[in-house]
Image (cartoon, helix red, strand yellow):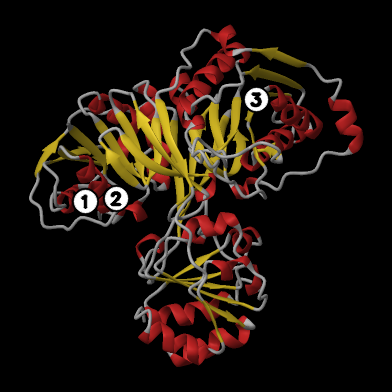
């Protein structure tokens, strides 16, 4: 089975995003960038499926600026076999990304597509579900366990009340949640080896899909800042303030 | 304008998130229809008919919708949706699962997690874990939107909508429900609780959460956790508060042994009052807390319990 993994280059999760003073967006100049954490989990899961013998080839795709090749190389160092970069300096909306990925799915015919459940920059949580819609494939979102059994996919999902397990026909689209696995680090020899793995480069124009934006960002502003309050000296003082000042207990 | 709201329910009861979502629909303005898709969901539909501001409750009662499988439900909502100017669902795991599938089928963008309605086509939503708020305007004919429930006060349940049964059944046949393991608790749900007490890595292990439960029982509170506590296996995932867990805004949020990572703050910083109990006075949680107590939680929490 071939596994396709989609990854996104985003702000490093340890960096606090700062809004530009002209309110046009978030300042990403000279900010550390990295693979979206949920995408790392998707890559790790693909590698584990290959190690278990459930997958035989891992193709990693990223849609983004030239520098997104770094994230593809990272995925190759972690165990993906080949990469596909769809280069665009324009930030595409989830629907456009899903349309491009649907074309990649049509060309590659994977048995399973793994994506992160959301990117930590736009926090949209859309692309996997949209890809599933456009390809008419079943979806297992927010996955915490994935097993290939008897030609079907058993997916345990993290839902509001607990856990839900579904059985999906293959091919299927899976989006990863935090508890699916703990991603490994790439070893130095594997990082060196990854440099020689094939990486194909395309542009959105090669796929003949409508990637025009549907949404216009009018403004990006900082959220209202919470004032730090007071440090109380004792539990007694805390209880007194909660009762008489805040009046919440 | 006409708005379709996807109801959050478990066939037996309507979930509170529906009320906040209808409030968002009212802020947009127009006729509001509420879709209850499930199996043996008459009780939820009856309750839906009482939601204030709703004109019609559309009921799709069929085994195909029993567990709200995205493949089947998205086909139904797509079929209905072309007649509406807006389609809304709460930002619950159900809403997040189904609605992007609907948007793609309708070839429109989705606007996720709105916290305010500026006009019928313009909305505010948090990005970058809530470190920025974007104002976005949609040019699509149908606006598909998930609603962050903490952004909208719930509507009341004093309405009297008509109930209409839908005959159409969609079964994609590609997904099947196997099982569910749901947490059973007498305490309020995290997203509906007025008071929440949450534990982090500082709790040390899952057993120590009993300390928080005792306080919770006295205050009628829900018990939450940080990602660190969930990842460490102390407590199950449904307790996680944060950027990718549950977003909460209770009257009182008590953070115990939680350092206050950006991702956790994203899930609780809209709480009315925040209390932080942590032995590390440098912990970032103190920067958002109204009341901070620098103390060992294993002393402070039992003392708190005894004094409230």
Residue at image x 10%, y 53%?
A: B159
Residue B44's tag is 1
Q: Is residue B130 placed above or below A48 in the rendered structure?
A: below
Residue at image x 60%, y 68%?
A: B258
Q: Give coordinates of residue B66: x percent, y percent.
A: 32, 42
Asked if residue B134 shows in the view, the reply is yes
Label 3 neighbourhood size at 10 Å, few (<14), some (14-19), many (20+)?
many
Residue at image x 14%, y 45%?
A: B54
Label 1 neighbourhood size at 10 Å, few (<14), some (14-19), many (20+)?
many
Task: Find residue A105 and report its image quarter.
Answer: top right
Q: In the displayed structure, does residue B159 sit left or right of residue A56?
A: left
Q: In the displayed structure, does residue B161 sit left or right of residue B121?
A: left
Label 2 neighbourhood size at 10 Å, few (<14), some (14-19), many (20+)?
many
**C-alpha span from label 3 to label 2:** 37 Å
2 and 1 marks in contact (CB < 8 Å): yes
Q: Marks 1 and 3: same chain? A: no
Q: Give the quadrant of the C terminus of chain A.
A: bottom left
Q: Give the quadrant of the N terminus of chain A.
A: top right
Q: Is residue B224 placed above or below B147 in the rendered structure?
A: below
Mark 3 belongs to chain: A
Residue hosting label 3: A62
**C-alpha span from label 2 to label 1:** 7 Å
**C-alpha span from label 1 to label 3:** 43 Å
Closer to us: A77 or A157: A77
Residue B9's tag is 2
Look at the numbered disc 2 and give the secondary structure of its residue.
Answer: loop
């Amino acid at each position: 089975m071939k596994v396709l993994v989609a990854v996104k280059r985003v702000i490093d999760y340890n960096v606090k995003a700062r809004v530009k003073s002209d309110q046009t967006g978030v300042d990403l100049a000279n900010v550390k960038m990295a693979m979206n954490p949920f995408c790392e989990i998707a890559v790790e899961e693909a590698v584990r499926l290959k190690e278990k013998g459930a997958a035989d080839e891992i193709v990693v795709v990223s849609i983004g600026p030239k520098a997104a090749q770094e994230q593809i190389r990272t995925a190759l160092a972690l165990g993906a076999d080949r990469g596909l970069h769809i280069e665009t300096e324009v930030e595409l909306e989830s629907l456009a990304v899903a349309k491009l990925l649907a074309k990649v799915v049509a060309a590659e015919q994977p048995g399973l597509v793994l994506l992160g459940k959301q990117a930590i920059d736009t926090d949209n949580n859309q692309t996997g579900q949209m890809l599933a819609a456009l390809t008419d494939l079943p979806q297992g979102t927010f996955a915490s366990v994935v097993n290939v059994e008897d030609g079907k996919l058993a997916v345990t999902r993290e839902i509001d009340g607990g856990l839900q397990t579904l059985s999906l026909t293959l091919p299927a689209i899976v989006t990863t949640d935090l508890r699916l696995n703990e991603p490994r680090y790439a070893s130095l020899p594997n990082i060196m080896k990854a440099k020689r793995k094939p990486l194909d480069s395309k542009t959105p124009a090669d796929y003949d899909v409508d990637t025009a934006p549907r949404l216009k960002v009018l403004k990006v502003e900082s959220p209202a800042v919470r004032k730090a309050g007071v440090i109380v000296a004792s539990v007694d003082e805390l209880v007194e303030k909660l009762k008489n000042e805040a009046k919440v207990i | 304008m006409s708005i379709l709201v996807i109801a959050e329910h478990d066939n037996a009861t309507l979930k509170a998130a529906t009320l906040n979502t209808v409030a968002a629909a009212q802020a947009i303005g127009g006729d509001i229809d509420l879709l209850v898709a499930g199996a043996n969901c008459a009780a939820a539909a009856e309750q839906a008919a009482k939601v204030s501001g709703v004109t019609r409750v559309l009921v799709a009662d069929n085994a195909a919708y029993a567990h709200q499988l995205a493949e089947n439900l998205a086909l139904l909502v797509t079929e209905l949706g072309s007649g509406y100017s807006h389609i809304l669902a709460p930002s619950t795991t159900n809403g997040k699962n189904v609605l992007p599938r609907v948007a793609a089928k309708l070839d429109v963008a989705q606007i996720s997690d709105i916290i305010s309605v500026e006009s019928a086509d313009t909305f505010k939503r948090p990005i970058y874990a809530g470190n920025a708020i974007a104002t976005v305007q949609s040019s699509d004919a149908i606006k598909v939107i998930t609603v962050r429930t903490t952004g909208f006060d719930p509507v009341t349940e004093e309405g009297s909508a008509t109930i209409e049964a839908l005959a159409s059944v969609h079964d994609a046949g590609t997904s099947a429900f196997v099982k569910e393991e749901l947490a059973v608790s007498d305490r309020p749900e995290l997203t509906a609780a007025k008071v929440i007490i949450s534990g982090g890595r500082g709790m040390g292990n899952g057993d120590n959460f009993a300390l928080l439960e005792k306080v919770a029982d006295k205050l009628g509170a829900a018990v939450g956790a940080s990602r660190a506590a969930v990842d460490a296996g102390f407590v199950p995932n449904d307790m996680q508060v944060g950027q990718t867990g549950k977003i909460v805004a209770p009257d009182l949020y008590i953070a115990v042994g939680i350092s206050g990572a950006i991702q956790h703050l994203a899930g609780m910083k809209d709480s009315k009052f925040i209390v932080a109990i942590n032995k590390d006075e440098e912990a970032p949680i103190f920067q958002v807390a109204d009341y901070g107590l620098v103390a060992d939680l294993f002393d402070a929490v039992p003392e708190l319990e005894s004094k409230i």
